[in-house]
Each structure stands twice: as C-alpha cells, then as structure tokens.
Image (cartoon, helix red, strand yellow):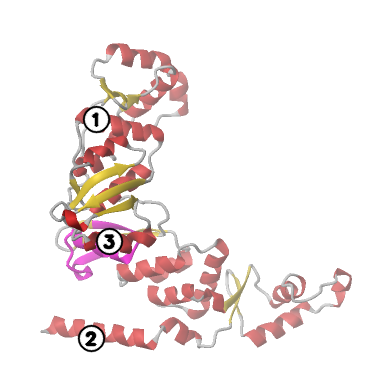
Amino acid sequence: MKIRASLYNETHLEYGVVTIPFPIPPDQYDSTIGMLESLDIGNPLARDCAVEELQGPCPILKRLEGTRVNVDELDYLIKRLDSFTDSELAQFQGMAAAKGFAEMTDLINLTFCCQQATVITDFTDLEQIGRDHYLNIHGGCAAMEELERLDARRTALDLILNDTSGQITPYGVVYDNGMRLEQLYDGCHFPDYKYSGSLMDVSLTSVHDARQTVFLSLPMPERQMERLIFRSGFESEEFARRTIQSCEFPQSLRSILDQGQESVFDLNRLCRACSGLSRQEWSKLEAAAAVTSPEDSAQLRRLAENLDLFDFVPDVHTPEEYGRHMIQQSGRFDYDSELDAFYDYEKYGRQRIQEEQGRFTEPGYIAYNGTLTLDELIQGDPAEQYQKEQAEGMEMGAGCS
C-alpha cells in the first residue's frame, strides 16, 4: 500500500505544502524530515503536521484530513496497513467506520485487533463467509479436520439472519464479534512490529522501568532511529538495556554480536553494510571473519564493506580441490579433459595457496588481496579510531566529575 500525504504548517500557511509518500522509503527518510523541518513541523513528539489531503487505496484514512498528525505515527500506521491482505484491509476500514475511530492512537491499535471482526463485502459466496467468520471468532486458526466438518453455509446464514449486531458501513456489513480495542500503543512507544527487510530486531529497555521499551528493526535510517529512541523517553543508550530479539546473521557471526557491548548505532551500521548480501557473499563474510577474528560489530562491518578485496571459492577445503577449481573452473586456463591424468592438482593448489597466502575455512577457501594488512583493514580509518578514543575519554571524564 502506498499513500501520498500533503502536509503543511497550519500556523504558517505561507510556508507551503509538501507531499510525502508513505511508508517513507528508507533512502528518503532524512530528506523527508528535512522538508518537514523547513516548514517548521515534523517534531518527533508532536502531532504538528496538518493534513491537507491523503491519496491512496484506503479511503477511511481520509478522516485524517483536516487534522494534525505525527509523521512517525503515520509512517508506522501505513507500514502496518501495507502488510494487510484485502480481507484484513476491509476489516480495518469496516471496524474504523463502525466504531467511529479517527484518532491516530486508536487507528494504530485497531491494526492489531481488527482481524477479530467479520466484514461481509460480498453475499454471493455463503461458504466463504461462513469459513471466514468461523476463523475470525477462533483467533484466525483451526484444524483442517475442524474446517472439513464445518457447515460453513449454515454458519453464514445463522450470522446474517440471526445476529442483529451487524452494522452497515461503506466498507461492508460489520460484526465486531466482541472485539476489544487493546491499548498496545500508548501514544509514545510503538509496539514491536517487524516490517519487511530487517536483518536484526533489537529492543532497548529502560534500566529503571521495564515498560519503557523501544523496538528497532535494523537496518533503518540513523535519523529515524534517533527519533524513535528520543520519542520513547531515552536520553541515551547509557540508561537502556539492549537485547537482540532476532537476528538473520549466520550463527558463526552472531557470537561476535553476543557480547552485549554493542551500540544499537553500531549494529545498525553493520546491518546496513550487510543488507543485500547474496548467500555466497554471506559465506564469504563468514570465511573472512574466520581468518581475521573480528572482535566487535565495527570490525565485522569493515569486512562486509570490503568483501571485494577477498577472493573466495565456496566448499573448497584441500589444496587438490583448489587446484582442480583453478584449472577446470576458474576460466584462467584452457582445460582439456583428455589431459586430466597429467594435471597435478594438489601441487598446483599448494603453489597458488602459498603465493596468495590463502586459508581454508569451513565455508571454503579465501585469500586477501588488499594493500592494507588485515589488522589495518578491520581496525579502520586511524582518524575515525582517534575520534572514537577521544569521545570515550570525554565520556569517562564526564562520569568522574
């Protein structure tokens, strides 16, 4: 689902109007916030963006026109709706219309419970209506044998003819089935929700109040992360306990991240560097890590950013296998199968390994061909390291004062 929202500052109409796509594309997040700030709106805590118009395939959201919204709340809501099926979208719109919901907190919370309702948009298929209703009132799941025994047509007719609670809305006839609007979203802390494309889900929980938690799906724009942490009431990570809730990294790399000392910003930069890696590139990163032994996410990130400096042959573990690969498959030789008995694959493999100073690892053979030493490569830019050490020194000094 794509929504276009035209937003403005209602106290300064002379600033004009900006039109923003939702969900906000990650590569446009910083520029989007910059546009809003140029209108003196977009505060992470305030609903200060006046809505002139909302365009998209969810008409119920036009109720927000003429109101003020918070840009991050609107982005979260549209992400939730973007994952909905057509049936779930009908349930959301039907329940919002039946209950008169038009406030952002209610709309976000409705996305987590509207699936309990039954919304009939087409009365021609009673079997489907009956099955859908049965699933709605049983939490969305039922055993196959249970559904086979179900008289779906009778269930549908009983609902339509005997249940007087149905409400007619522009989105269908709505039966709420006793749905209650749970306050999962409190107007400040977004409920945990994994949107598409995340490599790692991380939570920050206050050391003083376990109810104060922010969930982050990485990678995400760094500025968005800063805003989410800020709106959740954290002054800094120092006052939060970090937990990796889920991680798509290979197991051999996760141990590097399990030390508990990693900043969420460091983890985010790592995820950004690893986003889009192919399966073979993940294996290559595992092999590079095996020969360099990175100690933290920053060092692992530098490997991910410099994978092109490594030659990697997957599933090769002996000099003979490497020699055979080089002669038969690398494309560097005109291999003649008639002469196969005359090739000394092991000897050639050992020669190449010695020249390349390569290593065998569990994922395969890897050789580094960069100009820096491997230690220099994973330690990073000296100026960056100096700045980090200076910042750490200032923090230690501040803590002692």
- Determine the secondary structure under disc 1: helix
Image position, residue 138 (x, y; %): 34, 28
Where are the magenta residues, as a range? 214-243
Residue at image location 19% in from the left, 44% down from the top:
105
Q: Is residue 163 above or below residue 383?
A: above
- Front one among 219 and 50: 50
Q: Amino acid at mark 1?
A: Ala
- Front one among 358 and 101: 101
Mark 1 or mark 3: which is in front?
3
Reading the image, the residue beneath label 3 is 35
Specify the quadrant of the image occupied by residue 334.
bottom right
Reading the image, the residue beneath label 2 is 393
Specify the quadrant of the image occupied by residue 244.
bottom left
Q: Amino acid at mark 3?
A: Met
Locate the N terminus and report the quarter of the image it occupies.
top left
Q: Is residue 219 visible?
A: no
Of marks 2 and 3, which one's residue comes earlier in the chain? 3
Image position, residue 154 (x, y; %): 39, 13
Q: In whole angstroms, how far apart are the C-alphas of marks 1 and 3?
A: 33 Å
Q: Residue furthest front?
A: 14
Reading the image, the residue beneath label 1 is 97
